[in-house]
Image (tube, helix red, strand yellow):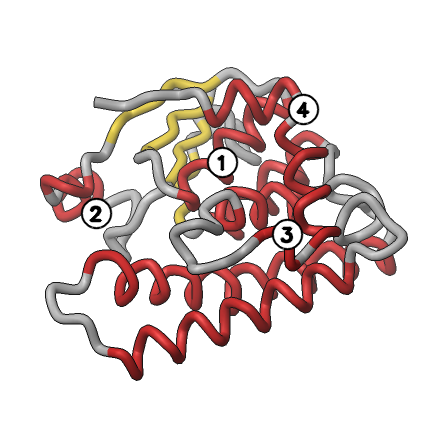
Amino acid sequence: MIDLYYWGTPNGHKITIALEEMGLDYTLYPINILENDQFQPDFLRISPNNKIPAIVDQDGPRGEPISIFESGAILQYLGRKTGLFYPTDEQERVEVEQWLMWQMGGLGPMFGQNHHFNRFAPEKIPYAIDRYINETKRLYSVLNKQLIGQKFVAGEYSIADMAILPWILRYEWQGIQIEDYPYVQEYIVRLTARPAVQKALSIKVA
């Protein structure tokens, strides 16, 4: 059994998608980031960076519980644990990892800044809005090009796709006309048709 500390953000959705796709049993523990639950001492012992998601696998590698924070690290751990969606062949694994790191280091942080300045900042700063919308468009172009001639970013469906999807589902927040990126548009349709993805995205927390 895996304990998932979660809120309904793109980073949270990454892990529910993975858990559903991998058929793992889990218990969901809501961490209400709107009420600063992420700063509570009990949660900080699991996630010292006070961010969701985090997990505790009660059946860890040595038969003992293990806690893991950072969504990319969680995805890699779950992929190794199950042998699913994370290839063992080194060349194939590198392909998955580079797109996972692209999401972790670029797409997620840049889209997060886009959301902040474009939607939530109390003061609208045109320079910041333009900067992050332009970078968002660049990243969509990178993804669109990568998807030409293939269904998934690393060839086969993988944890990299699970990491990318929740962020691009919010394209309207990001000032993106999804029709400008037809391969990304098809990718979204393809991934959201998967039953496990639908179940993961339907999870509500209150």
Residue 194 tag number: 4
Q: Which residue is mark 3?
A: 179
Residue 44 tag number: 2
Q: Amino acid at mark 4?
A: Arg
Disc 3 to disc 4: CB gap under 8 Å: no
**Which quarter of the figure is the C terminus placed in?**
top left
Q: Earlier in the sequence, mark 1 or mark 4?
A: 1
The reply, left or right, for residue 60 in relation to residue 185 is left
> Could you tell me which residue is drawn at 42 percent across and 58 percent down?
174
**Could you tell me how far apart the alpha carbons at marks 2 and 3 are, in whole angstroms?**
41 Å
Report helix, strand or loop for mark 4. loop
Q: Amino acid at mark 3?
A: Glu
Q: Amino acid at mark 1?
A: Ile
- Residue 179, compared with residue 57, is above or below; it is below
User: Mark 4, residues whose alpha carbon is within 10 Å: few (<14), some, or many (≥20)?
Assistant: few
Can you give x and y, in whole percent of width and height, for residue 70 in the image?
Answer: 43, 52
Q: Nearer the viewer, mark 3 or mark 4?
A: 3
Report helix, strand or loop for mark 1. helix
Q: Earlier in the sequence, mark 1 or mark 3?
A: 1
Q: Nearer the viewer, mark 1 or mark 4?
A: 4
Disc 1 to disc 3: CB gap under 8 Å: no
Report helix, strand or loop for mark 2. helix
Report helix, strand or loop for mark 3. helix
**Could you tell me how far apart the alpha carbons at marks 2 and 1 are, in whole angstroms?**
19 Å
Residue 15 tag number: 1
> Could you tell me which residue is drawn at 64 percent across and 52 percent down?
179
Q: Earlier in the sequence, mark 2 or mark 3?
A: 2
Q: Earlier in the sequence, mark 3 or mark 4?
A: 3
**Could you tell me how far apart the alpha carbons at marks 1 and 4 are, in whole angstroms?**
15 Å
- Residue 109, compared with residue 195, is above or below; it is below
Q: For this rendering, which residue is in front, 42 or 128?
A: 128
Can you give x and y, in whole percent of width and height, for residue 197 in the image?
Answer: 58, 26
